[in-house]
């Protein structure tokens, strides 16, 4: 859809072009308007539209955008990925998987990561275009981040998200988008994309026909808030989802696109997920054929099709009177505007990013940033008798083992780039000590055998065993990718591989010396199954190319761990409602009333912290209040420097379907031992509004609120109450 004001402007500009003759390739020897970077984007867009035939317009609406040689428009492939680094395009810095980066609870660091990714993207694009290589995954339009809510740990693609909390997801998503798109007022560095809009989080196997049922309260309070924050932050594109939402195919949903365009004022381009339009008549069966779908997509407000359906069938739809050329123009105009913002029709020298070259790709600073993010993402769940950190000055012999210890697969996650500098966990531990330390390695266990293990004498003869176990991207992921799963890339339970559990039990019988369990994965796992056999447990996620070095930084105490769980670790799948139930009751820390194995926001440190109030909230506010201000003092009372992640949670007055509690602020701070820091929070009261089903709008409820600050969602370290009246 396009606003009435923009429609009127385009009509006026089109008339202007016709009046002054700008539809010719040259105007009295002058450059055509669409190639003149001094002209406003709207004029350039109208000029280019006026030069295109209907068939050419349609050819530009697919992700494999065709060349228009007579206008010197090269082909362009819109499909590019950058979930945790430039993906599928050769050498690039691989950062931790998104779920791991969210565990850092560090939006400022994530912004730096996104800046690095977009720099590498621009460099690769510059290098490719210089050789006229217009191939997939080397462009500037990136279909990241994935800001769906990880509502159920069975979802294989949950690893791509920033976790289960709308507030955390929104904050991190905005940081990523701003880093990707840059801050130049006239150019986009790259174009980011908020996906998958909306109410999309499995089941993977059924996504092409599934109908997610959700009422307005859960829609507005859980599934949409992060999308709105990214739209408010200026995200260039939004991608629709495969599934239906309350009977409407999400890709062409009048409800969802109406909220996006008319209510939120989204001005960027809206695209389909890949081959989602085919689902409308083949999977959802709501329209009869591809021609009617092509027309419906344009009328609904689709600007770009990640398939060939629109390119193949839109002209047919036009000839059948199902869509007008003006509607096609309106759709393409939004897409062309994105290309103008990216500088596609400008001289390369006019771009502030034209100088990026090979030295901007996978350079030393980006590698160091990947290592830093990986270390900040790792979560320490257990550290009995201070088993960690290890003293690398005195340790003599280390045994590294486990099915994930020497493989690159557990570093990657899905949607990954590749790097010649992949550091496995084994390599990181070896590199973390001097050559006079004996590091012995044996894989120890394979995935599908719970009875045959390597001899365990290495464990008994070593001072410490580091066992790297857990999941890998073949056990959880996207439909079609995670081919070792039993359930179409989703998990059927929370269990670790049975062979890994049996192996660590076997190790425990062979040694009384410390066993450090390192678990890889992108979702909640049943850690309790191995907890009795390990002295320390670290969640490493899928930590990217520097995962091994980052683990060494944690294990040897160069970095005090401060990662926090962005998802709830449950005791069992039986604690949760059915997987295909999209109602939020009983799901995530916001609505789960049982006892979690490890709560949202949880993570241990090598040091300790003391909290105290500096400025408490006022005792009462009116419903017209703007900002809730508070500040706390945090003191490092332990024996080493470290980071603390201060988290602010709010509990609401008693009312129907209120969350148990909600995150409304967080800040990661570095505090030297013996020192204090003041941490300030500003919480807009708009963040405390809840959807009133009767009034069909957000409302700030009156009553008593409780607020607490601590190190997790269950750490009510300091508490205060306030009244809204």
Image (cartoon, rainbow, N blue to C red):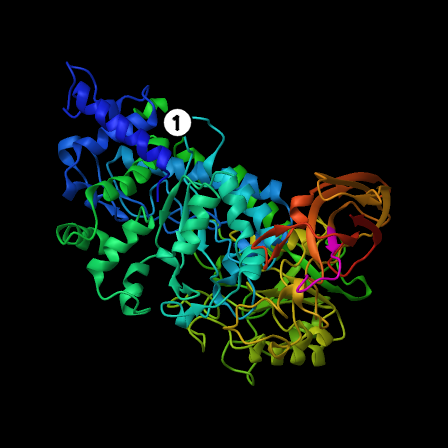
Instruction: Residue under label 1, please give it.
Output: 355
Quadrant of the snapshot with the N terminus: top left
Residue at x-position 48% and y-position 33%: 182
Where is residue 198 drawn, in percent x and y?
46, 57
Give above or below for 28 relative to 41: above
Return the residue nearer the eye: 696 or 567. 696
Q: Residue furthest top?
A: 28
> Which SS does the magenta portion mostly show?
loop
Where is residue 25 drawn, in percent x and y?
15, 24
**Residue 530, magenta (yes or no):** no
Residue at x-position 51% and y-position 76%: 447
- CA neighbours of label 1 inside 10 A, class few (<14), some (14 to 19), many (20+): few
Where is residue 643 drawn, in percent x and y?
73, 46
Q: Quadrant of residue 325?
A: top left
Q: Quadrant of residue 399?
A: bottom right
Q: Residue furthest front?
A: 695
Q: Is residue 413 left or right of residue 562?
A: left
**Residue 652, magenta (yes or no):** yes
Q: Quadrant of residue 350?
A: top left
Q: Residue furthest bottom?
A: 451
- Tell me the element at label 1: loop
Residue 335 at least partly seen: yes
Where is residue 209 drawn, in percent x and y?
36, 70
Residue 363 at least partly seen: no
Return the residue nearer the eye: 241 or 641. 241
Give above or below for 392 relative to 45: below
Q: Which residues are magenta?
A: 648-658
- Numbered disc total: 1
Residue at x-position 42% and y-position 69%: 211
């Amino acid at each position: 859809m396009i606003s009435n004001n923009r429609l009127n402007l385009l009509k006026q500009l089109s008339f202007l072009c016709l009046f002054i003759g700008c539809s010719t390739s040259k105007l009295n020897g002058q450059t055509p308007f669409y190639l003149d970077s001094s002209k406003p984007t709207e004029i350039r867009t109208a000029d280019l539209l006026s030069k295109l035939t209907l068939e050419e317009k349609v050819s530009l609406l697919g992700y494999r955008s065709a060349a228009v040689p007579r206008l010197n428009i090269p082909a362009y492939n819109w499909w590019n990925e950058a979930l945790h680094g430039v993906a599928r395009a050769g050498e690039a810095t691989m950062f931790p998987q998104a779920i791991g980066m969210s565990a850092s609870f560090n939006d400022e660091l994530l912004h730096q990561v996104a800046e690095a990714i977009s720099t590498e993207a621009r460099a690769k694009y510059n290098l490719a275009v210089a050789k006229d290589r217009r191939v997939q995954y080397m462009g500037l339009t990136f279909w990241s981040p994935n800001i769906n809510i990880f509502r159920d740990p069975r979802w294989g693609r949950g690893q791509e998200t920033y976790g289960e909390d709308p507030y955390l997801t929104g904050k991190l998503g905005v940081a990523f988008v701003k880093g990707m798109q840059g801050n130049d007022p006239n150019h986009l560095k790259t174009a980011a994309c908020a996906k998958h809009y909306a109410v999309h989080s499995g089941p993977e196997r059924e996504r092409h026909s599934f109908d997610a049922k959700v009422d307005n309260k859960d829609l507005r309070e859980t599934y949409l808030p992060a999308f709105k924050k990214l739209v408010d932050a200026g995200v260039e594109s939004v991608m629709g989802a495969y599934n239906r939402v309350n009977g409407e195919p999400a890709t062409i949903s009048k409800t969802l696109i109406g909220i996006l365009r008319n209510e939120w004022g989204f001005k960027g381009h809206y695209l389909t997920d890949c081959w989602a339009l085919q689902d409308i008549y083949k999977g959802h069966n709501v329209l009869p054929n591809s021609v009617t779908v092509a027309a419906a997509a344009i009328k609904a407000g689709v600007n770009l099709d990640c398939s060939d359906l629109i390119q193949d069938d839109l002209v047919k739809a036009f000839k059948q009177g199902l869509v007008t050329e003006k509607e096609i123009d309106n759709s393409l105009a939004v897409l062309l505007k994105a290309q103008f913002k990216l500088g596609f029709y400008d001289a390369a020298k006019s771009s502030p990013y034209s100088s990026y070259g090979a030295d901007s790709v996978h350079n030393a600073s980006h590698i160091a940033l990947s290592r830093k993010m990986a270390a900040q993402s790792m979560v320490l769940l257990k550290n009995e008798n201070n088993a960690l950190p290890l003293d690398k000055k005195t340790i003599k012999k280390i045994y590294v083992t486990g099915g994930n210890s020497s493989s690159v697969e557990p570093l990657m996650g899905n949607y990954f780039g590749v790097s010649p500098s992949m550091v496995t966990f084994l390599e990181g531990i070896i590199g973390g000590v001097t050559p006079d330390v004996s590091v012995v390695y044996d894989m120890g266990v394979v995935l599908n055998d719970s009875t045959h293990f390597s001899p365990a004498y290495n464990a008994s003869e070593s001072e410490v065993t580091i066992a790297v176990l857990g999941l890998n991207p073949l056990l959880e992921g996207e439909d079609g990718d995670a081919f070792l799963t039993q359930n179409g890339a989703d998990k059927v339970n929370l269990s670790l591989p049975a062979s890994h559990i049996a192996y660590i039990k076997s190790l425990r019988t062979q040694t009384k010396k410390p066993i450090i369990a390192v678990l890889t994965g992108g979702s909640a796992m049943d850690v309790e199954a191995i907890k009795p056999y390990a002295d320390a447990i670290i969640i490493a996620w899928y930590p990217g190319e520097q995962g091994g070095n980052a683990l060494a930084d944690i294990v040897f105490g160069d970095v005090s761990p401060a990662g926090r769980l962005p998802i709830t670790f449950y005791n069992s799948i039986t604690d949760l409602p059915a997987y295909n139930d999209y109602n939020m009751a009983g799901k995530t820390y916001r609505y789960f009333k049982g006892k979690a194995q490890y709560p949202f926001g949880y993570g241990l440190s090598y040091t300790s912290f003391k909290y105290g109030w500096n400025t408490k909230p006022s005792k009462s506010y009116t419903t017209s209040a703007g900002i809730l201000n508070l500040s706390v003092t945090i003191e490092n009372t332990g024996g080493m420097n470290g980071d603390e992640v201060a988290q602010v949670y709010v509990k609401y007055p008693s009312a129907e379907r209120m969350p148990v509690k909600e995150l409304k602020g967080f800040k990661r701070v570095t505090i030297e031992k013996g020192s204090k820091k003041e941490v300030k929070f500003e919480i807009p009261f708009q963040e405390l509004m809840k959807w009133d089903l009767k009034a069909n709008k957000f409302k700030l409820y009156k009553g008593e609120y409780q607020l607490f600050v601590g190190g997790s969602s269950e750490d009510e370290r300091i508490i205060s109450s306030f009244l809204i009246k």
